[in-house]
Image: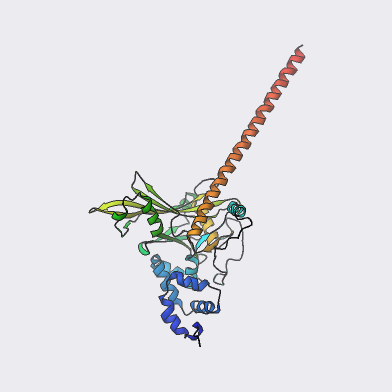
Amino acid sequence: MATTLEDIHQDIIQKHILPRLDGPSLWTIATATASSSSSYLRSLCSDDDHYKLWTDVSMSTWPSITHPRVHQIISTFPNGYRSFFQDSFPSLFTYSPSYLSYLHQKNKNKTKLTNVKPIPKTNLHQNDHQRMTSCDHHPLSSKLISLVDIRYKGNIIYSKTHFTDTTNDHFLSSPFQIVLNESTHVPKKFDELAPLNDEETLSFLKESMTLNWIIINPTHKRAGNLSTIKPVSVKYGWVSNEINLQYITVLPGCNPKDEMVKCKIQLVLLESNIEGDVILQVKEISLKAQDLVSSNWLNGKDFMVITQRAILEENNVKRSVIDDERRLMSHIQLKQIKKDQKEAKKEEEKKKFVAKFNYAGLMSLLFCYYIYFFLSTSI
């Protein structure tokens, strides 16, 4: 008779099998819905007594959360580290209206999008019950907590916990930006890939450098990952000898029907030579947000409003594990938004030109009529 998972004592699974799984494997189990075996494993993962499992996998995935203050905040989440992991392991994403229209035209009479797998709805969070559009309908958190972890070929090379006070007027009204300058070396000699501006090297870094930038909202006891994990672009600076890697996520703006913003995470690697070896150094990591319609950089208040809505999955924001196809979709979406923006700008300039032309024509007509009337009365 065949042995099933249900035949194995749950203590063996919980104490000897599940703790050996990594984050992606646990995520697959926690969100699987296809079979009774999957349901059984999912119930074991969701056991309230299995707190250590989610604590250990979260800390191994993101070492930045080991900060005592972060640990205290995560402990207030509805299901502690399990809630935090299910918030943070998938990344935040959305589709802009223009991109949906683009996909509709491209995929007409073809198969619909099936590769996007958002997190199934669970009862982990009870406060996401409305979809509202006012910029101030939720109280803003007094603290913004950033958790940044960078890995090279799966090995952690940089980990930082950053706290931002969001209550002062300077933060709320000034262009939003977080810059982390602490440096560390990428543990790799690049002699075999030199020169660093070679396409092969840039492609290698695009696959090897993964980054997570998780923000925590203590007020709502939620978290969200703003990174695409792997970079969407890698460029070499000829003058500075720096490599710029960008991780870009598109989210709805303050007016979600008409505005989209991009959250741009930039990782700067500096080329240096130590004892004859070519070494890459993590020089800087930064986070900014830009309105894609006006091209203006967001201030602190707008950033807090937009990301807080995204974390609560409002305005059609979802969570999804990012793969290469999703990153490509994100890149295409950004290009489509920029294209629409240029076309809208051209249309506006055309309307202004037509209006000015009509005004000039009207004034010319009135002038001719005036001359004709003047000459007629003079005769």
The quadrant in which the C terminus is found is top right
Res 352 → quadrant: top right
Q: Nearer the viewer, residue 31 or 214?
A: 31
Res 205 → quadrant: bottom left
As drawn, 10 above or below 233: below
Q: Position of residue 298 (x, y in %)?
A: 50, 50
Q: Residue extending furthest top?
A: 379
How is colour applied across the structure in the image? rainbow
In the image, taking residue 280 as reference, residue 178 lies left or right, namely right
As drawn, 347 above or below 287: above
Q: Nearer the viewer, residue 140 or 98?
A: 98
Q: Position of residue 208 (x, y in %)?
A: 38, 59
Q: What residue is at 49 percent from the left and 48 percent from the top?
A: 297
Q: Is residue 72 visible?
A: yes
Q: Position of residue 342 (x, y in %)?
A: 56, 43
Q: Position of residue 244 (x, y in %)?
A: 39, 51
Q: Residue extending furthest left?
A: 275
Q: What residue is at 64 percent from the left and 57 percent from the top?
A: 109
Q: Residue extending furthest bottom?
A: 1
In the image, taking residue 379 as reference, residue 234 lies left or right, namely left
Res 190 → quadrant: bottom left
Q: Is residue 75 visible?
A: no
In the image, taking residue 359 as reference, residue 221 lies left or right, namely left
